[in-house]
Image: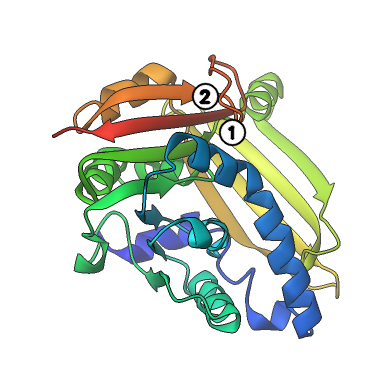
């Protein structure tokens, strides 16, 4: 197994490339927008894990949550497979003169020694955990093991999964098994329109999602596809309980309890001693 397998499930590679920001003002506007998206996650983490001072984020993307957390922790580390996102994050860190965040390119299924940090808190959000079983057999088990290895005994885990209940229901209802949607993106985004083609494979509980982005300047990017393993609450409990205990499930970042059929599944857990 190699990281090249991830190319088919790395739908944001290149989205934050320098050419997508015509000037510094556009990049600053985008930074503010993604920081604003992190406020609820920041509040949740501060409420539940205010004592955590050494944290690591797997699949950290553009680094937005680490940037939001920087002033609240002693050390923040993160990694992602996408080279363009790592470059974006490190430029942001440099521009703002942040000295307690380190971000590098790495693979959660085959992490380097940089990821062995004995952290107080490990994060894996924005649905990233759903990728791993779709990449390779037992990918979820391997990712759970490696997340546990990043933590000290008694350290905490926060995960967020996207459940897509409405999209899955629509796929099942349509004769061809697909759902096609589009949405207009915010003014701060380098892209104007976002088109989606969903297909749910019931035999494997994998949601295939082909993405098309149309840039404000008219360019079309139709190369992005992700595959997400959709877990039930019980499946995740069985998977994570090998290495974790005290699992709690929420439907949102306001800590409301999760129920099957909710759009999001957010969970916290403690690494076993």
**Total number of numbered labels?**
2
SS class of the residue under badge 1? loop
Q: Is residue 239 visible?
A: yes
Q: Please name the residue shown 35% across and 48% down the image.
A: 122
Split into 4 quadrants, where in the image is the N terminus?
bottom left
Crowding near the residue tagged with mark 1, few <14, some 14–19, many ≥20 C-alpha atoms within 10 Å: some
Name the one closer to the observer, 249 or 136. Answer: 249
| Residue assigned mark 2 | 250
Split into 4 quadrants, where in the image is the C terminus?
top left
Marks 1 and 2, Cα distance to the nearest angstrom? Answer: 7 Å
Q: Position of residue 29 (x, y in %)?
A: 78, 69
Q: Position of residue 147 (x, y in %)?
A: 28, 47
Q: How is the image coloured?
A: rainbow
Residue 66 left/right relative to 217: left
Name the one closer to the observer, 3 or 197. Answer: 3
Q: Please name the residue shown 43% across and 57% down the image.
A: 73
Name the one closer to the observer, 265 or 213. Answer: 265
88 lies above or below 196: below
| Residue assigned mark 1 | 253
Q: Please name the residue shown 53% across and 63% down the image.
A: 63
The quarter of the picture where residue 36 lies is bottom right
Q: Please name the residue shown 19% across and 29% down the image.
A: 242
Name the one closer to the observer, 236 or 46. Answer: 46
Tell whether label 2 touches label 1 (CB within 8 Å): yes
21 lies above or below 241: below
């Amino acid at each position: 197994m190699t990281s090249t397998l991830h190319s088919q499930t790395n739908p944001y590679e290149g989205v934050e490339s320098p050419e997508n920001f015509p000037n510094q003002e556009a990049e600053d506007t985008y930074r503010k927008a993604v920081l604003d998206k992190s406020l609820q996650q920041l509040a949740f983490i501060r409420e539940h894990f205010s004592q955590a001072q050494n944290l690591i984020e797997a699949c950290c993307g553009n680094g937005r949550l680490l940037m939001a957390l920087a002033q609240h922790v002693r050390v923040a580390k993160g990694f992602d497979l996408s080279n363009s996102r790592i470059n974006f994050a490190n430029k942001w860190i440099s521009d703002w003169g942040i000295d307690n965040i380190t971000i590098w390119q790495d693979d959660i299924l085959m992490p380097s020694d940089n990821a062995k940090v004995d952290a107080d808190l490990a994060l894996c959000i924005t649905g990233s955990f759903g990728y791993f079983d779709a990449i390779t057999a037992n990918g979820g088990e391997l990712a759970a093991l490696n997340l546990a290895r990043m933590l000290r005994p008694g350290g905490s885990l926060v995960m967020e999964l996207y459940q897509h209940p409405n999209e899955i229901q629509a796929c099942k209802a349509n004769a061809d098994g697909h759902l096609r949607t589009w949405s207009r993106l915010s003014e701060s985004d380098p892209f104007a329109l976002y088109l989606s083609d969903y297909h749910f494979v019931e035999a494997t509980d994998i949601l295939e999602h082909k993405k098309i982005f149309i840039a404000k300047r008219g360019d079309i990017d139709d190369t992005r596809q992700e595959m997400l393993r959709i877990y039930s609450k019980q499946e995740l409990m069985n998977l994570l309980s090998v290495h974790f205990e005290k699992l709690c499930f929420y439907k949102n970042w306001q800590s409301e309890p999760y129920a099957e059929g909710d759009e999001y599944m957010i969970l916290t857990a403690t690494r076993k001693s």
